[in-house]
Amino acid sequence: MPRTLAAIAMALAASAALLSSAPAAVAAAEPTGVVQTASTVVRLDAANNRLKVAITVRVANHTPDGTEQYPCTRYTGGFFSIPYPAMCDRAVKYYVDNTSVVVDAAATGLKATSGTKSLTTTLGTTAAATGEAYRSVTIQVPKLFNGDRRTVVVTFTVPGGEPRSSVPVRALKAFARFCVPANGSTSGTVAVRVPKRYAMSTSGAKLRATLDGSTRVFSSGTISSTAGWQACFSGTNAGAYRTERLDGPGGSTINLQSWPEDQAWADGVRDDVTSSLPMLERLTGVAPSTTSPIDIREAGTGAQRSGTFDGASNTITVGEDFGEPALVQHELAHAWFNLSTFADPWLAEGFAEWAGRQAAGEPPCDAPDDAGGSVDLGHWLSVDGSSTQAEHDAAVAQYLAACHVITAVADAAGQERMTTAIVALLGRRDPYAVDGGGSGTRASAKATWEDWLDAVDELALDPARATDGLAADLLVQYKVAADSDVLAQRAAARRAYRSLLAASPGWTVPVAIRAPLADWKFDAASSAIAAAAGTWDVTGETDATLDGVDARLGIAAKAWQGARTVSELRAASDLADRQLSAARAVAAARAALDQPLDLVQKVGMFATDVPAVDEAIVAVRRGDDDAAAKAAAQIRASVAGLRATGEQRIVVGSTLALVLMILLAVVATRRAIAERARRAEARQAAAVVAIATAHPSRPSAPPLAAPDAAPAPRGDRWQHNPLDDSPTQRWDGPPLLVIPSSEGDPDIAKLVRPRPPSDDPPPQS
C-alpha cells in the first residue's frame, strides 16, 4: 500500500510539473518522454462579429516506467534476525492526466472534448508573459501512461467588440482586427481563415497565404518554438463600407467611408470635415496638389496612430475613436501637407498639426519639455508595436516640437503672410521672385527645410518685421540645421539682398542673384549682389540728365533683370554707364542748342540743317552710344558754326543787295528814258497833225529830229527874218521843228528853225 501511494504521488508530481512549466502563450518544454502538439484554426465570422477558434491538441506519453529507491527496514539472516535500515527498490509508472491551451481572454462557449467525451476545463488567470489578451485553460484527461496517446479538441468563440469599445478584437462587416497565439509545448501550427474579400495585412510572425475557394488561408507551417509566437491581422472589406460623398477642397470629392455598424462615426467626421474645410482652404491659399477624390475611411483605433494619410492612394484613415481633438482636421490637412510636397517628415506633420488645430479651434502647440535638448527633428522617429514607452514619448515630443516651430513662425508673421509663404512652398515658387511676378520655381519637386526657411523668411517674417533669425534659431534648437556657419553666411547674403531690393524698387531680382540664393551658394550670391549694385542709381541719373530716355524701363534695366550670370550683370552695369555718358553728351548739346541766339547766329540758323535732338535721344535710349555721340557732336558743331555762317551770310547778302539795287537803278533809268522817248514821240506826232491840219497845202515836213537833239544855236550866223505873228504871214524859211517845251504845259511845242549846214566843227560838249 505505501508503495502504491508513493507511485501515485510521483505520477501526480510529474503531471503537475508538466502543467506548471507551460508558459502563457504556449506550453513550455515538456519533461522528457511527453510530446504535446497543437493545431490552432481561427475563422473570421464577420456576419456575427466574432472569431471561431478550434485547437486540436495531441498528447503522447513516452515516459518509460522505472524503479525508485525508498528507505526501508531489512533483517539480518540467521536464527536471530536483526532489523536494520536500508534502501529498497520499487516500480514506478509515470502518467499524464491533463493538458493546457492558451485562449483569448474574452473567449466564450469554451468546450473540450476527446472523441465524444466532454472534458473538464479550468480557466487560469491571464498569463503575465503575454499580457492581458490571453489566459490559460487546463483540460483534465484520463491518465496517459507510457505509450498512451490522446487527442483533445478545444473550441470557443471570441466576440468582436463594438466600435470604440475596450475589446481589442474587431470582426465587423467592413473591418477586422485580431491576434492569434500558437499552442503546443513541443510544436504547433496555426491557420487563419478569412473571406478573401478582406484585404488583410499581417504583423508579427510570418505567414503564407493561399486561396481555398472564397476563403484566404494564412498558414504558419510547423512552429518549432511556440513560446511567444503571435500573428496579428488587420484588414478591410471595401465592398461593405457605407459611402457618402461630400464636397472636397479645390472642387474635389470626399468619399466618407464608414462601417455599417457605426453611424456615430459618420455623423461626427462629416461635421468635422464640413466645418473645418473652409478654414483649411484659407490657411493654405491653394487647392491640394491633386484633385483626385479623397477617401476618408474608418479604421480601428490603434495603439500607435489614431489616423493616417496615404498620399499614394489619397486615402485618409481615421480611427473609430474619432473624437480625439483635431484628429480629423489634422489628417485632412495632410491633403496639402504630405511627403509628396515636403522632403522632411517634420514639415508635413508640423504643418498638418498646426493647420488642424487652427481649423478645429484647438489651442496652439506649446514647446515640448526639452530641457536636455533631446528633440531631434532631423531624425524623425517611427513607432510600432514593439516600441518602448520611451520611444513613444520621444515620438510625441517630436510631433509637438514640429508643430511648435510652425506655430511660432505663423504667430510672428500673421495668417495672411503665412498663407503667402505656404502658397510659394506648395507651388514650388522661388520666394525671392514672387513679388516680381513669381517667374522662378525651385528645382526640387519637394520642399526641403531650406526651401521652408527661405519662404517664411522672405514672404512671412521679413514683411512682418519679425525678430531677425527667428526661424533659423528654431531650426538650430531642434537640430534641423546643424551648421551654424552656413546660416551666418546666409544671413549676411540676405542682408545685402534686402539692401539691393530697397535700392532698386520695381525691378525683378535677376536669376544671377536668385539662383545662388536658392541653391544656398552664398559666396556666389554675394558676388552677384555686388555686381548688381549701382545700376539702378545710374539709370536714374540718366533719366534725370536727359528727358525721354526712360533708362529705368530701357535696355539696361532689362539686361539687369534678365542677367543669369555675374558677367551679364556687369555687362548691364557697363551698358548703364555708357548710356549715362551718352545722355550727358546729348544733354550738353541740347543745352547749347537751347541758348538764346544773337542776330548773327539767327542769320546763321536760318535754313541751316541742324541735327535733331530727338534722334540723339532715340540713340541713347537704344544704347547706341556711338550714334548718340556722333549726333551730339554734330549738334555742337552746328551751334558753334552758326556765327561764322551768319557773318558769311550777311556779307553775301549785303553784296547781293547792293548789286540788286544797282540793277534796279539801271532798270529804272532805262525805263524812265524809254518813257520820255515815248512821250516825245507822242507829242511830235500831235504837233505834226496840228500843222498839217492848219496848212493842208504845205508839203510834208521832214522827219522830226531826235528828241534829245541839241537845239540850234542862236546868233547872227543865222540869216532869218523876224517872226511875223500875222496869220496872213507866209513863212518862206526852212521847215520848223517842233520841240517839246520843258516849261509849262508839256503839250505846247516850240517851233525852231533848223540850222543850215555849216563847215564849222560841232561845239564841244
Image: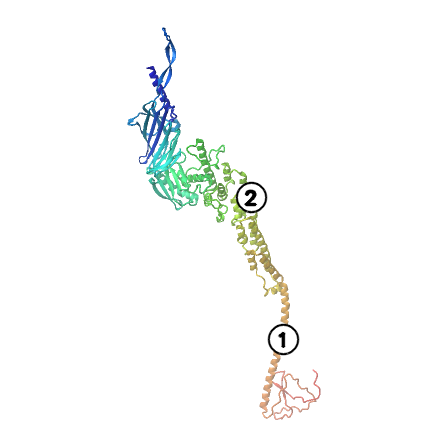
In the structure shown, which secondary structural element does the residue marked by tag 2 occupy?
helix
Residue toward you, 163 or 65: 65
Q: Position of residue 248 (x, y in %)?
A: 38, 44
Q: Position of residue 349 (x, y in %)?
A: 44, 39
Residue at the right extreme? Answer: 760
Q: Is residue 73 visible?
A: yes
State the residue position of label 2.
Answer: 523
Q: Quadrant of the N terminus?
A: top left
Query: Which picture quadrant has residue 641?
Result: bottom right
Query: Which picture quadrant has residue 192?
Result: top left
Residue at the front extreme? Answer: 78
Q: Residues within 10 Å of mark 1 (few under 14, many from 20)?
A: few
Q: Position of residue 359 (x, y in %)?
A: 41, 40
Q: Residue at x 38, y 11 (%)?
A: 85
The amino acid pointed to by label 1 is Ala
Q: Position of residue 542 (x, y in %)?
A: 57, 53
Q: Is residue 696 above or below residue 55?
A: below
- Give how far apart the Cα atoms at labels 2 and 1 are: 91 Å
State the residue position of label 1.
Answer: 665
Does label 2 or label 1 sit earlier along the sequence? 2
The amino acid pointed to by label 2 is Asp
Q: Is residue 595 visible?
A: no
**2 or 1: mark nearer the eye:** 2
Q: Is residue 95 above or below residue 348?
A: above
Q: Residues within 10 Å of mark 2 (few under 14, many from 20)?
A: some
Residue toward you, 114 or 318: 114
